[in-house]
Image (cartoon, rainbow, N blue to C red):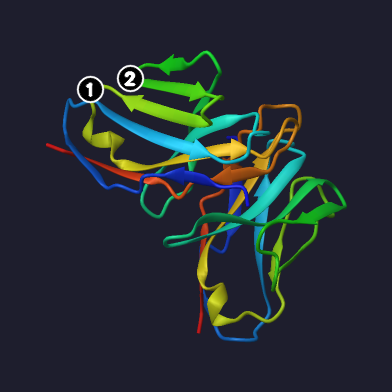
Amino acid sequence: EAQVTQNPRYLITVTGKKLTVTCSQNMNHEYMSWYRQDPGLGLRQIYYSMNVEVTDKGDVPEGYKVSRKEKRNFPLILESPSPNQTSLYFCASSPLGGKGEQFFGPGTRLTVL
Amino acid sequence: RKEVEQDPGPFNVPEGATVAFNCTYSNSASQSFFWYRQDCRKEPKLLMSVYSSGNEDGRFTAQLNRASQYISLLIRDSKLSDSATYLCVVTERAGSYQLTFGKGTKLSVIP
């Protein structure tokens, strides 16, 4: 089944404790992206990647890192999480050459205390 | 700043009703347009792309007016299962994969 998976789905952590949210897609998509969704603010892009070893900042990159060492994986790293990073996070992927429609993972609900 | 504006709703409509959502976008360079559906606390899923000539998929009809930078979604014969938030989404420019999302319009279809 073609899909984007994220782990963990739910995470409660404390300020300053480094964490990684994994994202993996099995559709051989070149483009991958991370979003956060907050009430009243909609979906905002954190980082994106056009292909292996190619990443770039989105609209709200502060406090996040990403890497793209393999085509299928695009982990999101929070080196020192803070309470304002409490949010619902989505990973998405898209094939290059398509119309731009993106396929989303199921989401990771992160709470930073 | 590039923006996509939607009426947040909620739209509360009875089963069988016809409901229309509107969306305006500020970036005249936007080239691709979509409607996504998002159920509560779930991931957004593509409902339909929007083409310049307008397009229909069953009970759903999407329209694009480039001159007015306006997109619409019409849902006919609403079902309870149509209850969701509908997101208007545009790309930044031709060939771009960067999406700008509206904040969504919430629809509740009531029996």
Q: Circle 2 marks a residue in which chain?
A: B
Callout 2: 10 Å neighbours few (<14), some, many (20+)? few
Check the image and report above or below for B80 versus A88: above
Which quadrant of the view contains residue B41? bottom left
Q: Which residue is mark 1?
A: B77
Q: CA distance from mark 1 to mark 2?
A: 7 Å
Q: Amino acid at mark 2?
A: Arg
| Helix, strand or loop at mark 1 | loop
The chain letter for the residue carrying disc 1 is B
Query: Residue A83: percent from the left, percent from the top?
Result: 54, 81
Residue A3 can be seen in this image: no
Amino acid on which disc 1 is placed: Asp
Please name whichever residue, A36 or B72, is drawn nearer the observer in this view of the structure.
B72
> Residue most toward the left?
B111
Q: Please state if B35 lies on the left or on the right of B108 as rendered.
A: right
Q: Position of residue B101 (x, y in %)?
A: 54, 46
Up/down of B49 relative to A49, above or below: above
From the top left corner, tell me how far across and down residue A3 is, in percent.
59, 40
What is the x, y in percent for residue A17? 65, 84
The kind of secondary structure element at disc 2 is: loop
Residue A58 in the figure: left or right of residue B62: right
Determine the image quadrant of residue A69.
Answer: bottom right
Marks 1/2 in contact by CB < 8 Å: the verdict is yes
Name the residue located 57 percent from the left edge and 41 percent from the top edge.
B26
Query: Residue pushed farthest top?
Result: B53
Which numbered disc covers residue B59?
2
Residue depicted at x 58% and y 35%? A1
